[in-house]
Protein backbone atom coordinates (compact mmCIF):
# COMPACT_ATOMS: atom_id res chain seq x y z
CA UNK A 1 0.00 0.00 0.00
CA UNK A 2 1.34 3.41 -0.95
CA UNK A 3 1.32 6.15 1.68
CA UNK A 4 -0.12 9.28 0.05
CA UNK A 5 2.10 12.12 1.24
CA UNK A 6 2.19 15.88 0.86
CA UNK A 7 4.93 18.37 1.71
CA UNK A 8 4.10 21.89 2.92
CA UNK A 9 6.92 24.37 3.50
CA UNK A 10 7.33 27.99 2.44
CA UNK A 11 10.97 27.36 1.45
CA UNK A 12 11.20 25.65 -1.95
CA UNK A 13 14.67 24.12 -1.38
CA UNK A 14 13.38 22.33 1.71
CA UNK A 15 10.38 21.00 -0.24
CA UNK A 16 12.71 19.78 -2.97
CA UNK A 17 15.08 18.07 -0.52
CA UNK A 18 12.23 16.32 1.32
CA UNK A 19 10.80 15.19 -2.01
CA UNK A 20 14.17 13.82 -3.06
CA UNK A 21 14.60 11.90 0.19
CA UNK A 22 11.05 10.57 0.24
CA UNK A 23 11.27 9.32 -3.34
CA UNK A 24 13.90 6.86 -2.08
CA UNK A 25 11.15 5.10 -0.12
CA UNK A 26 9.12 2.69 -2.26
CA UNK A 27 6.02 2.91 -0.04
CA UNK A 28 5.76 6.73 -0.26
CA UNK A 29 3.79 8.44 -3.01
CA UNK A 30 4.14 12.22 -3.07
CA UNK A 31 0.78 13.55 -4.20
CA UNK A 32 1.42 17.23 -3.50
CA UNK A 33 4.11 19.76 -2.70
CA UNK A 34 3.14 23.27 -1.57
CA UNK A 35 4.95 26.45 -0.60
CA UNK A 36 1.72 28.22 0.36
CA UNK A 37 -0.39 27.05 3.30
CA UNK A 38 -3.67 28.37 1.87
CA UNK A 39 -3.17 26.48 -1.38
CA UNK A 40 -2.33 23.36 0.62
CA UNK A 41 -5.46 23.83 2.73
CA UNK A 42 -7.65 24.02 -0.38
CA UNK A 43 -6.01 20.90 -1.76
CA UNK A 44 -6.51 18.97 1.48
CA UNK A 45 -10.20 19.84 1.61
CA UNK A 46 -10.72 17.84 -1.59
CA UNK A 47 -7.87 15.32 -1.51
CA UNK A 48 -7.26 13.20 1.57
CA UNK A 49 -3.74 12.00 2.28
CA UNK A 50 -2.06 9.71 4.78
CA UNK A 51 1.02 11.70 5.77
CA UNK A 52 1.88 15.41 5.86
CA UNK A 53 5.31 16.99 6.27
CA UNK A 54 4.35 20.44 7.52
CA UNK A 55 6.45 23.48 8.38
CA UNK A 56 5.20 25.27 11.49
CA UNK A 57 6.59 28.78 10.81
CA UNK A 58 4.99 29.99 7.58
CA UNK A 59 3.44 33.28 6.42
CA UNK A 60 -0.34 33.70 6.22
CA UNK A 61 -1.48 30.53 8.04
CA UNK A 62 1.17 28.84 10.14
CA UNK A 63 1.34 25.07 10.56
CA UNK A 64 -0.76 25.10 13.74
CA UNK A 65 -3.50 27.18 12.13
CA UNK A 66 -3.54 24.95 9.08
Image (tube, rainbow, N blue to C red):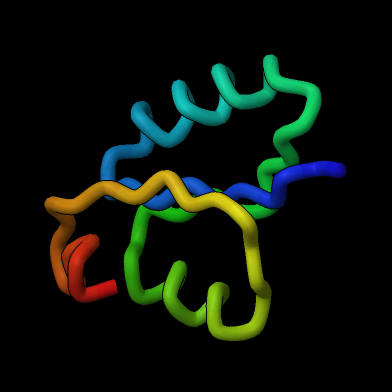
**Above or below for 30 versus 32:** above
**Total marks in image:** 0
The residue drawn where x is 20% and y is 75% is 65
The residue drawn where x is 49% and y is 81% is 42
Q: Is residue 33 left or right of residue 28?
A: left
Front residue (pair 66, 13): 66
Q: For the view shown, which residue lies furthest in the right direction? A: 1
**Above or below for 43 versus 45:** above
Q: Quadrant of residue 21?
A: top right
Q: Is residue 18 left or right of residue 23?
A: left
The residue drawn where x is 56% and y is 29% is 19
Figure quadrant of the C terminus: bottom left
Where is residue 27? Give x, y as percent.
77, 31
Figure quadrant of the N terminus: top right
Q: For the view shown, which residue lies furthest in the front direction? A: 1
Where is residue 61? Give x, y as percent.
20, 72
Where is residue 22? Give x, y as percent.
60, 25
**Above or below for 62 versus 51:** below
Q: Is residue 8 left or right of residue 33?
A: left
Where is residue 58? Give x, y as percent.
17, 56
Amino acid sequence: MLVKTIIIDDEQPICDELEYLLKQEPDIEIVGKFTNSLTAFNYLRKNPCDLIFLDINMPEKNGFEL
